[in-house]
Image (cartoon, coloured by chain):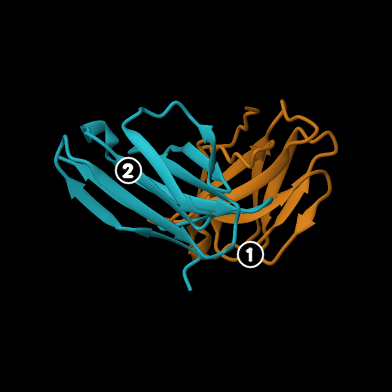
Chain colours: A cyan, B orange
């Protein structure tokens, strides 16, 4: 069973489009995250939600809007995609100690 | 956020122990020391964490200096599957896991 699952695994889209990445965790964790890993492999936190409430927003452009319909899901919607949004996006969840990461979604904007 | 400093890369021979160092001289009293690793084309994977005392688990051991300004992740017998980027992270509340640049470990057969 996959603890943290993201869909899709790969996403290729044109500039200006709107796209969503879905994330689900079956670990019963209270906290979920989105991270972005750029071409230089630097992992940067974007958002963190605890019990469906936003607790961390690391100066991410307004075009990025996370949505948490329930504790087990944290989806990422991106409007008006730009070339610089190309990266691997990781979803994660945690409960007090370790964070568990999904396999990532490789987004390519052309 | 308190920062960590790690060597960019290290090499180890297969089946030998590996000591991955991390400096965190600005650590605060409530910061936990976490280690994660990222294998090629995969998401980060939790390895171990500790506060003050040394810790052991099935994957590795964590040795924490008495002043807590440095720590060392110990892989007792490196295998080819241990080749990854290892991240030393300080977690100081709100469960905010902030990654640095990490150490790329190469394991030589």
Dot label at residue B77: 1
Tell me which residue sits at (60%, 66%) in the image: B15
- The answer to whether residue B10 is above or below residue B47 is above
- The answer to whether residue B100 is above or below residue A6 is above
Q: Dot 2 corresponds to which residue?
A: A77
On the rendered structure, is A96 left or right of A101? right
Q: Residue furthest front?
A: A69
Q: Quadrant of residue B87?
A: top right
Q: Picture coordinates of residue A109 (x, y %)? A: 20, 40
Nearest the eye: B27 or A27: A27
Residue density around tag 1, few if under 14, some if 14–19, many if 20 or more, within 10 Å:
some
Q: Picture coordinates of residue A6 (x, y %)? A: 38, 58
Nearest the eye: A99 or B47: A99
Q: Secondary structure at mark 2?
A: strand
On the rendered structure, is B90 left or right of A81? right
Q: Are marks 2 and 1 on the same chain?
A: no
Q: Secondary structure at mark 1?
A: loop
Residue A53 visible in image: yes
* Chain assignment, label 2: A
Tell me which residue sits at (33%, 38%) in the image: A39
């Amino acid at each position: 069973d996959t603890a943290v699952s993201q869909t899709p695994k790969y996403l290729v889209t044109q500039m200006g489009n709107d796209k969503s990445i879905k994330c689900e965790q079956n670990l019963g964790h209270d906290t979920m995250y989105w991270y972005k890993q750029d071409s230089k492999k630097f992992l940067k936190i974007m958002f963190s939600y605890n019990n469906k409430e936003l607790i961390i927003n690391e100066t991410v452009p307004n075009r990025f809007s996370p949505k948490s319909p329930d504790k087990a899901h944290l989806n990422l919607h991106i409007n008006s995609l730009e070339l610089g949004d190309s990266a691997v996006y990781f979803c994660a969840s945690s409960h007090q100690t370790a964070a568990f990461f999904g396999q990532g979604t490789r987004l390519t904007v052309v | 956020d308190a920062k960590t400093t790690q060597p960019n890369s290290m090499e180890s021979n297969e089946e030998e122990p590996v000591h991955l160092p991390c400096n965190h001289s600005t650590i605060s009293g409530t910061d936990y020391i976490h280690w994660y690793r990222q294998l090629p084309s995969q998401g980060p994977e939790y390895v171990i964490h500790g506060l003050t005392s040394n810790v052991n688990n099935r994957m590795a051991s964590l040795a924490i200096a008495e002043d807590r300004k440095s720590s060392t992740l110990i892989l007792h017998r490196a295998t080819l599957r241990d080749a990854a980027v290892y991240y030393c992270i300080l977690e100081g509340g709100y469960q905010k896991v902030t990654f640095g640049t990490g150490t790329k470990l190469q394991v030589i057969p």
